[in-house]
Image: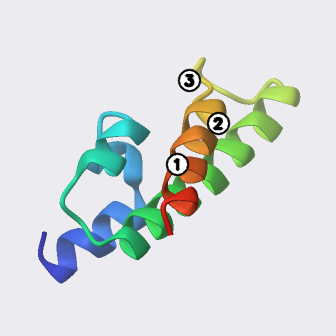
């Protein structure tokens, strides 16, 4: 993945990957995968906050899936 594509993935992981598992299974360096998943985790947390205020469009809650992927990567250090 080129530098610009990596930046795009970090800025909007859900557009670059179909699932957090896709990040884990990609050929990106481990640190970049973690960075992408951390960005996705932040987005998911913001989405949950919005949902609590009834301000979402019914998006799927991916936070547990993202956290599993992060634990997997962080445990492989």
Sequence order check, earlier mark of 3 and 1: 3
Q: Is residue 33 left or right of residue 39?
A: left
Q: Residue at x 30, y 67 (%)?
A: 8
Q: Residue at x 48, y 69 (%)?
A: 35
**Quadrant in which the N terminus is drawn:** bottom left
Compare residues 26 and 42 and report the one nearer the observer.
26
Mark number displayed over residue 72:
1
The residues tagged by marks 3 and 1 sit, at their Cα atoms, a distance apart of: 24 Å
User: Which residue matches tag 3?
Assistant: 59
Q: Mark 2: few, some, or many residues within 10 Å (few <14, many ≥20)? A: some
Q: Position of residue 58 (x, y in %)?
A: 60, 17
42 relative to 64, above or below: below
Q: Position of residue 47 (x, y in %)?
A: 68, 39
Label 2: state its secondary structure: helix
User: Which residue matches tag 2?
Assistant: 63
Q: Where is residue 66 in the image (x, y as percent from the top left)?
A: 56, 41
* Image marks 2 and 3: residues in contact by CB distance under 8 Å: no
The residues tagged by marks 2 and 1 sit, at their Cα atoms, a distance apart of: 14 Å
Q: Name the image quarter holding residue 39.
A: bottom right
Q: Looking at this rendering, what residue extends furthest in the bottom direction? A: 3
């Amino acid at each position: 993945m080129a530098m610009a594509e990596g930046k795009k993935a970090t800025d909007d992981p859900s557009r670059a990957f179909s699932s957090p598992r896709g990040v884990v299974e990609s050929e990106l360096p481990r640190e970049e995968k973690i960075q992408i998943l951390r960005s996705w985790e932040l987005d998911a947390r913001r989405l949950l906050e919005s949902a609590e205020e009834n301000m979402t469009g019914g998006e799927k809650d991916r936070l547990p899936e993202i956290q599993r992927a992060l634990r997997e990567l962080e445990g492989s250090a």
